[in-house]
Image (cartoon, rainbow, N blue to C red):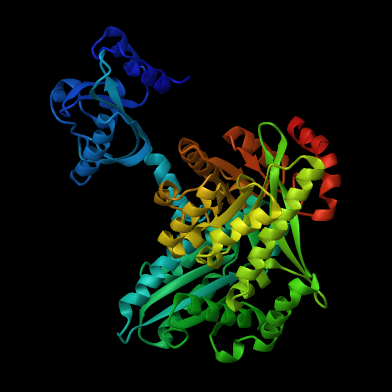
Amino acid sequence: MDKVENGERFYAEAHFQVFSEQFNVLIDHITDAVDVLDLSGNLMKVNRAFEHMYGWKESEIIGHKLPIIPPDYLREAESLHDRAKNGSKVSGYETIRMNKDGTQIHTLLTISPLIDTKGNVSGYIGISRDITEQKKAVNELTFIDQLTKLPNLSYFRDCSQAELSKIQGSKNKVALILVNLDRFSLINDSFSQLTADLLLQEVANRLMSSIGADHLLARFGADEFAILCSNISQKRDIIQIVRNILRQFQTCFHVDDHEADITGSIGISVYPQDGQTIDALFKNAKAALLQAKRAGGNTYCFYDKKYEPPRVDRYQLANDLKKAVHRGELEVHYQPIVEVERNIIRGFEALIRWKHHRMGWISPTEFIPLAEETGLINQIGLWVIQKACHDMKRLRRLHGSPKMIAVNLSPLQLENKQLPKQIRDILRASGLAANRLELEITESAIAQNVETAIETLQELVKMGVQISIDDFGTGYSSLSYLKRLPFHNLKIDKSFIQSGKVEDEAILKAVIMIAHQLQKKVVAEGVETFDQFELLNRLHFDYFQGYLVSKPIPVDLLPQYLNQQATKITEIKML
């Protein structure tokens, strides 16, 4: 039991005495800030950690109101104290408090009632922990590319959309410039990961120097950068910028005792003629970028309608997708999810696969967006849930495990108001208990319609269904979402697990600490090496999945896998 829990037990006892020597010694050994208030809200006691954290000496504030609450948070604080006055305890509440010099501090707050010898509430005790650095780290995860320290896709899209809204009706134009490094995979194959990373950092520096401070530069792919150029009046202004960029690549890169000749291909779309939304501009800039690649690279292309791929292929593929379920072309494969500490399989994640009758295996990154565009995603998504539930029920009957099955939800499925009823019907038909089904949603799915998402998720949670936030850190990560959403598990995107960077490990520590403080479990995705597994142990992850244990497995092979898995997982732990 830690010091905070000891303190809570002590002040909760009926014979509690605020100014007893034992109490004073106890709270001065608690590393979190402690304040004791009477029912009128006047301070009776603070500990040393409080003085250090907030800059107030006890002698300055005893008998006065708590001076650490910003004016905008006074009503909130009054509400929290009212809850304690009624005998309720407030735990893990995230809010803002204020240092003596006015600096705001992000805190995790616990407020409990003080009970006198007659069993009545006589005051309150508050315990606050400074989470400013952790919140800063999580916010950095949200908006900053950790390698180059440039804005990431999430921040870039938000700024771009705001810029488009601002200039509507004006004569000014906005250019979206995509820069992709030519044949960068050869750099990765030839040099160490460290050298490749240093080269990307140098590329970012040169791009920044070529566009100046008036335009927004971001990185959101391994070797892809985006530039938003505002207040453009003429096409030649854009041409000047892209020529400056290409000129930066003419000089050889010298990094870590290596020389590298790097060139870039550039695709450009212009608002409003090439698109009036950021999605349309991205789509058309990518089409122009592809044309620059086809021209041999080291050049630029403006978007032209002739660059659009033929629509007949996608139309035919969409028709084939409609028939794929009936043809038996869709399959569900299952990847194990392993509990880190006990080395047992907790469950499986269900992953859809499509083996086309003519073209063979088609990547989900190709057919899932097509399913969403054509309205097939609800039908296919429900089929996957139904198949996964029936498969897991059968597997539990034959083998006695696994405990749960995780299935991904599309953002469009989350908007379907009938989803809770449909899942209830699937669970009833399959016989699988609701708490053995886990639905995974991405941060972007939540952000599209927060209130609708929360309402749907709350209804699912009431049924007993488990909820996971998937690919955390790649989209709209927000502590406010973590506080508001009804969820059980947080899945960390594999890019943070696989990077091996010190700064990523620091961010992981912060996210895990916050998740565990909220009593949520943390899952690592994409674990492929023993070094990454050691990272999980060091940072106290709860679960993991990845090729280190197994690739996704067809359902027919699961019984055999479960019979053999114990030996493999034990070997991983021993190593």
Lateral position of residue 220 relative to residue 115, left or right: right
Q: Residue at x 24, y 40 (%)?
A: 79
Q: Position of residue 157 (x, y in %)?
A: 44, 68
Q: Position of residue 78 (x, y in %)?
A: 21, 38
**Total of numbered circles in the picture?**
0
Q: Is residue 10 visible?
A: yes
Q: Residue furthest top?
A: 21
Lateral position of residue 248 relative to residue 170, left or right: right
Q: Is residue 500 visible?
A: no
Q: Quadrant of the C terminus?
A: top right
Q: Position of residue 439 (x, y in %)?
A: 59, 53
Lateral position of residue 185 relative to residue 49, left or right: right
Quick one: 381 or 277, which is closer to the camera?
381
Quick one: 169 or 313, which is closer to the camera?
313
Vertical placement of residue 140 versus 68, above or below: below
Q: Position of residue 106 (x, y in %)?
A: 33, 41
Vertical placement of residue 15 versus 132, above or below: above
Quick one: 106 or 244, which is closer to the camera?
106
Lateral position of residue 438 relative to residue 416, left or right: right
Q: Residue furthest bottom?
A: 306
Vertical placement of residue 279 versus 220, above or below: below
Q: Residue at x 71, y 34 (%)?
A: 343
Vertical placement of residue 376 versus 221, above or below: below
Quick one: 170 or 550, which is closer to the camera?
550
